[in-house]
Image: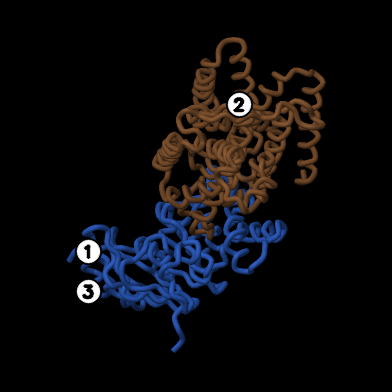
Amino acid sequence: MTEPLLRVNRLSKRFGGFVALDNVDLAVTQGERVGLIGPNGSGKSTLVNCICGTLHNETGSVTFAGEKMDGLIAHERTRRGLARSFQLPRPFMSMSVADNIRVPLLYTVAARVGHHVSKAEADARCMELLKLVALDAKAARSPRDLTQVEMRKLELARAMAAEPKLLLADESMAGLSHSEVEDIVQLLLRLNERGITIIMIEHIMRAVMSFSQRLVVLVSGRKIADGKPDEVIKDREVIGAYLGQ
Amino acid sequence: MRTPVFVLLEIVAGAALFLILRAVNNDYLFFAGYTVLQFIVLSTAWNILGGYCGYVNFGSAGFFALGVYTSVFLYTVNQNLEELMPESLLPLMQAIFPLPLPVLILLGGIVAGLVGLGTGYLTLRLRGVFFAIATLALAVVLQTFVVNWSFVGGSRGAYVIPPSTVPVLGPYIQYLFLLMLLLVILSVTCARLIERSRLGYGFATIRDDELAAEACGVPTLRLKLIATVLSGALMGMAGAPFPYYIGYVEPGSAFDLSYAVNSIAMPMIGGTTWWAGPMLGAVLLGTLQQIATVTISSAVNLLIVGLLLIGFVIAAPDGIVGLWHTWTSRRSKA
């Protein structure tokens, strides 16, 4: 059996007396599309933060591409191929849209390849990524000029600029219209076709069901289900958690 | 414009300024000009951490004073070589001392840079107002240390007697002016290089959103340390020639609140996002203060700074550079 790309082993995180994550296990294989769902406060974003190094877990471990991530801070994990987008878009407001994409190229890609990324290389890559998310026409604009869906696309393009092996898309569709949700799902599918493993953290079940090959459910910091989407949504415990039965 | 061309232009402009002042042949202009140049270095240095990274440093006076007291310390060592040094080392030390002023500037920069590094490690996990208060506290701690250190004069202060002339140039103040001019070229070139480099992008991401910066692979703590060291070192370098300029140093003058206030006000008024902003602010405020000193009173200086700062914060929060950008973008749209 091949080693999973990401292995989360008995991960726990507390905030004072509140248990946000309780012995969570998760394994994601290369190229997989995983949906991570759960009610508000179930620990989804905390899990993302612990995997990416934004938060430090008290117990348990995160192994990525065969390497232990424990003790590594966020930017070191990004450089090893773990990228994320944020629940609320966090663009660099003082920079242009293109420069937002340039940052991971200058810091993550350059550190990985071990040499400086030339301006021409960076420009070409920026435009390629902006075309992928249909923002090339707004490359020189400020992120302030973008619509909500464009902001989400910029967030994903910026995560992609780090050339990740695994992308954690944290509620990339929150607040978007039906057609905009479809737009983002198609974008994530295109990214996955390029060989990027994706964990989608989402509340919009339509999007999760059409995107995911596997569904993981968190409730009160515990993993209560992990399997094929069609089977998981019929699980009694999952239905109980969502409907309060 | 490429950096070597830019440096060449700076040298030409600096040389022109120096020659014009020499032609006027009034030492007061060199005294007043030195202060303005000193503020250009201080405000440019402040802007590296405060403007580019968004970390407001209220402790500029502390870093400046580190440079001042590095010079005072080494001057005092030179004055007491025979008492301080063992006989075996005395000939060597007599050959080394007195250290030339450029070496004192370099050492002042190293001391302030090292303290900047230590401060960074201790305080850069703090953000916003907490970081600002920590830097203010640093200045107070350093001042208390100096007040109680009798070797450098303690609270009674120390005299540093500069030579009245130097070979070739003549009056010593012209030599000091020239050194400060070189420090201006160094600091402005440094700021411009940062702005156009990978480091500049990294600093801007820290100012905008540190969490997102880390997620993009930016080593935020390391970059903040680089900014604190660079900023502190330049401030220390600006302080090192000060004892030779003023002749008598006591903690009250070296740690003067006006250094901290001016270091913040000048970039804010000039504009924090462009290397020329702090320089514009320093030239404007520094010149106004020098004029006020000779025409009204030196006590009115901080009033001018305060009023201008309030005016700019209300009417032009992005400073003169921001006003310029707004004006040019309106013109291009029209």
- How busy is the neighbourhood of tag 1: few (under 14 within 10 Å), some, or many (20 plus)? few
Q: Residue at x 47, y 28 (%)?
A: B156
| Residue type pointed to by label 2 | Ile
Q: Where the C terminus of chain B falls, by quadrant?
A: top right
Which chain corresponds to the colour blue?
A
Q: Chain of mark 2?
A: B
| Residue type pointed to by label 3 | Arg
For the residues labelled 3 and 1, the Cα–Cα distance comes to 10 Å
- How busy is the neighbourhood of tag 2: few (under 14 within 10 Å), some, or many (20 plus)? some
* Same chain? Circles 1 and 2: no
Q: Residue at x 55, y 58 (%)?
A: A158
Q: Which residue is mark 1?
A: A243
Q: Which residue is mark 2?
A: B246
- For residue B330, side relative to residue A44 (left or right): right
The label shown at residue A113 is: none
- For residue B295, side relative to residue B151 (left or right): right
Determine if residue B309 is in view: yes
